[in-house]
Image: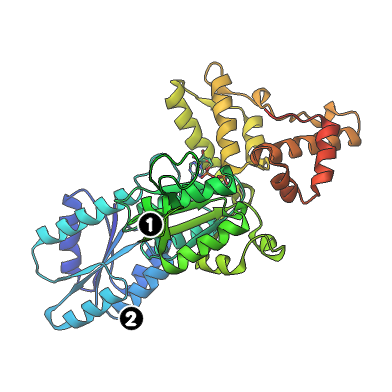
Amino acid sequence: MNILVVDDEKNYRETLKIILEDEGYNVHEAKDGEEALFKVKNNEYHIVFSDLKMPKMDGMELLRGIKSVNESTKVIIITGYGTIENAVCAMKRGAETYFIKGCSPKKIIEEIKSIEKNLRNENIDNNHILKSKNKTFNDVLRICKKTADRNVNILLLGESGVGKDVLVNYIHNNSNRKEGKLRAVNCNSFSENLIESELFGYHKGAFTGALKDRIGKFEAAHGSTLFLDEIGDLGLNTQVKILRTLENKEIERIGSNETIKVDFRLICATNRNIYRLIEENKFRKDLFYRISTIVVDIPSLRDRREDIEDFIEFFIGKSEKNMDKTIHKVEDSLMEFLLNYNYPGNIRELKNIIERLVVLSEDGIMRKRDISIRERSIEEYKSLKEYRKNLEQEYITGVLKAHDYNVAYAAEKLNISKRQLFNKIKEYNIVRK
Ligand SMILES: Nc1ncnc2c1ncn2[C@@H]1O[C@H](COP(=O)(O)OP(=O)(O)OP(=O)(O)O)[C@@H](O)[C@H]1O
């Protein structure tokens, strides 16, 4: 934990520094707000202790500055007796808490330990990288975190494999509903009839095969979070029913007249172009407005290239553990390929590539020759036409695979008609693998 202590009173600053260092924290000092803000911009602090009354820039202004640089830095106000009211005001503006100068150091340490524990819980997800060097993705993370605790409906948009599922879990685990079980429904894996049973449940005897009462996901998500994945694939009839549920916060199981109150937090996601679906009257505008209080556009991996290297390292580490292998070298040419590849299947594709390369590695070396995507060197092609065809085939195959061979989605992604895509599939003899 990195901590910054800001106080114009040298003695107090140094004493607090010694106390905190004794507990094993890494502590920096600043004598006024200006110096503190400079340090905050150039270092990553988990906690800033700040006095309120200081020359040049007071604690309140510093608090505002810190929060605009890094929302997640916790600010603790240190104040004299005379300024408690201001300290309370600072808490309303985002400060974590306040201490009165001269209070027992034990109290301060307890507070830090509690912040430390919360921070660890927030980042406990060891299976995913929830940090980024990319501004757009950092904004995504910030919005998810900021809105996690509010009961607003969130719509996640993004290509397949960008990590929508991962973010849904992140939001749920940072929300005040985290004790409840996150319930998820993939809207594209059910027929229209089945999806309604899945969502609303049914009453015994409602239809042939309804042998006993069954609760649906809306009810199961009571007190928790409901994730509707691939919402763009919902039929119009189901859309109307969902809209009604969202408006009334109540459901009726199929075959029953009894209304049941439901209280859930809704997160939806789709990798389809929802705006186009609305234009084509395939998705109801009123439902869109209901589910999209907050819209989060997740960038594709090729639009956040600065994170690729970290993902490579991360997935190598995971694969080493899972496969009990050790990697000590990645060939330069392979690294260059991995850093420049387009990843139509996004993070999922990168993860799969790395897993495969680790399996195929020999003597702890990951080699470019094991890349299955036909990435032959330019010399190997006889003509530009042949090169183009290969590239096209590779791209189309990748997009089809990323969309689970759903021709409608893939055509949308490729921005060609379904008919054109069928012709290409025939031409290249692309088969589902
Ligand atoms: N931040 C991350 N750190 C580590 N792995 C990630 C991260 N984001 C995504 N992944 C991995 O990439 C794969 C795809 O992620 P996820 O299922 O969340 O994508 P998605 O956008 O929901 O895809 P789809 O639209 O196809 O459902 C998963 O195996 C997931 O573990």
How did the renderer colour the structure?
A: rainbow
Between residues 147 and 361, which one lies in front from this camera angle?
147
Q: Amino acid at mark 1?
A: Glu
Is 309 placed left or right of 433 in the picture?
Answer: left
- Res 102 seen here: yes
- Which quadrant does the C terminus fall into? top right
- Residue 120 spot, x, y in % from top left: 30, 48
Is 18 placed left or right of 200 in the picture?
Answer: left
- Residue 417 spot, x, y in % from top left: 81, 49
With respect to residue 357, does 183 lie above or below? below
The residue labelled by disc 1 is: 44
Q: Secondary structure at mark 2?
A: loop
With respect to residue 366, does 396 lie above or below? below
Residue at horizontal 50 percent and vertical 68 percent from the top: 293
- Residue 353 spot, x, y in % from top left: 60, 31
Using the numbered discs, state the Cα–Cα distance from disc 1 to disc 2 in whole angstroms. 23 Å
Is 13 placed left or right of 136 in the picture?
Answer: left
Please give the label number shown on residue 56.
2
Badges 1 and 2: C-beta atoms under 8 Å apart?
no
- Res 141 seen here: no
With respect to residue 186, does 41 lie above or below? below
Q: Earlier in the sequence, mark 1 or mark 2?
A: 1
Task: Report which quarter residue 398 is drawn in.
Answer: top right
- Residue 245 spot, x, y in % from top left: 46, 63
Q: Amino acid at mark 2?
A: Lys
